[in-house]
Amino acid sequence: MGGLSIWHWLIVLVIVVLVFGTKKLGTIGKDLGSAVRGFKEGMQEGAGDNPRIGDQSGNTIEGEVKEKTKG
């Protein structure tokens, strides 16, 4: 009752191929790969926009917080 054996995974794979077909599965794989690639590129571009990400200078910015008055 523990884990699934290799035979269970092969049966699941055969059923998935029969239901979706190889062409559809290939298209899904390509779409998923391009989405992951785009996400990684977006994360790298976003790191350049924010100076705090990847900044190892150790500088601390000090400031004073003032209360906003109702006016």
Image (cartoon, grey):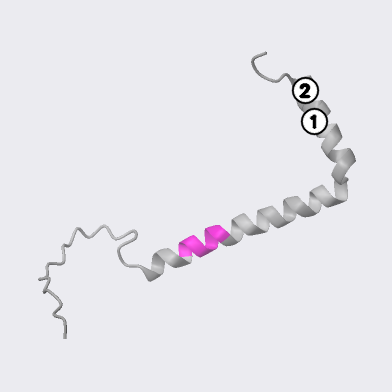
Instruction: Report crowding for label 1: few under 14, some 14 to 19, many 20 or more residues within 10 A (C-alpha).
Output: few
Which residue is label 1 attached to?
A: 12
Q: Residue at x 87, y 42 (%)?
A: 19
Where's the C terminus, which quadrant? Answer: bottom left
Q: Is residue 17 left or right of residue 46?
A: right
CA neighbours of label 2 inside 10 A, class few (<14), some (14 to 19), many (20+): few
- Relative to residue 11, is residue 45 depicted above or below? below
Vertical placement of residue 54 versus 18, above or below: below
Q: Are marks 2 and 1 in contact (CB under 8 Å)?
A: yes
Q: Residue furthest top?
A: 1
Circle 1: residue type = Val
Callout 2: SS: helix
Q: Which label belongs to residue 24?
A: none
Structural distance between the alpha carbons of marks 2 and 1: 6 Å
- Give the extent of the magenta segment: 39-44
Residue 59: percent from left, percent from top: 17, 62
Write the residue at 80% across / 50% down.
26
Q: Quadrant of the N terminus?
A: top right
Question: As shown in the figure, which amino acid type bears the numbered disc 2?
Answer: His
Residue 39 drawn at (x, y percent): 56, 59
Residue 8 has which mark? Answer: 2
Q: Secondary structure at mark 1?
A: helix
Q: Give the residue at x 35% y 68%.
A: 50
The furthest residue to the front: 71
- Give the residue drawn at x 76%, y 27%: 9
Q: Residue furthest bottom?
A: 71
Q: Residue 43 colored magenta?
A: yes
Question: In terms of secondary structure, what is the magenta stretch mainly?
Answer: helix
Question: In x, y percent, where is residue 40?
Answer: 53, 58
Residue 52 spot, x, y in % from top left: 30, 63
Q: Nearer the viewer, residue 17 or 70?
A: 70
